[in-house]
């Protein structure tokens, strides 16, 4: 996470938005497109609980083209894979 936060800050992201990212649905600092992407990412991550909810799908399709949504899905799936590998092999997430 620290690596990604540093990268985001270097591209102009604010520390405040990073700090409230886990509460993205409750705060008013993310665009509709960003909220759609975050909802999509959460739904894909929790897909073992059931399919992506229809309202999340509809929101994502309203904000992203078919290609963009496929690309976003690949990005989220790849991050989930990396996270699972890190957990499996007991990677130390603390910055060092």
Image (cartoon, helix red, strand yellow):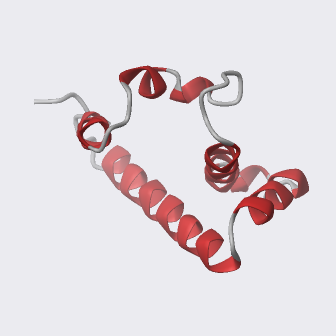
Considering every residue shown, the one lying at the far bottom of the view is 67
Q: Quadrant of residue 44?
A: bottom right
* Residue 85: x %, y % from top left: 35, 55
Q: Is residue 51 visible?
A: no
Q: Quadrant of the N terminus?
A: top left
Q: Is residue 37 visible?
A: yes
**Rendered residue at 62%/30% (across/down):** 24
Considering every residue shown, the one lying at the far left of the view is 96
**Rendered residue at 85%/54% (across/down):** 53
Q: Is residue 71 above or below residue 87?
A: below
Nearest to the observer: residue 79 or residue 10? 10
Q: Is residue 9 above or below residue 44?
A: above
Q: Is residue 30 above or below residue 46?
A: above
Instruction: From the viewer's perspective, tell me whether residue 84 is left or right of residue 41.
Output: left
**Rendered residue at 81%/55% (across/down):** 59
* Residue 36: x %, y % from top left: 70, 49
* Residue 27: x %, y % from top left: 66, 22
Q: Quadrant of the C terminus?
A: top left
**Rendered residue at 37%/35% (across/down):** 13
Nearest to the observer: residue 30 or residue 81? 30
Nearest to the observer: residue 29 or residue 24? 29
Nearest to the observer: residue 29 or residue 52? 29
* Residue 8: x %, y % from top left: 32, 41
């Amino acid at each position: 996470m620290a690596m990604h936060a540093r990268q985001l800050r270097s591209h102009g992201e604010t520390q405040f938005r990073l700090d409230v990212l886990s509460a993205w649905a409750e705060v008013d600092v993310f665009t509709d497109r960003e909220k759609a992407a975050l909802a999509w990412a959460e739904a894909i991550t929790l897909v073992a609980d059931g399919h992506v909810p229809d309202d999340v799908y509809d929101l994502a399709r309203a904000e992203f083209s078919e290609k963009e949504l496929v690309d976003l899905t690949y990005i989220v799936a790849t991050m989930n894979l990396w996270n699972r590998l890190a957990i499996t092999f007991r990677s130390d997430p603390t910055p060092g």
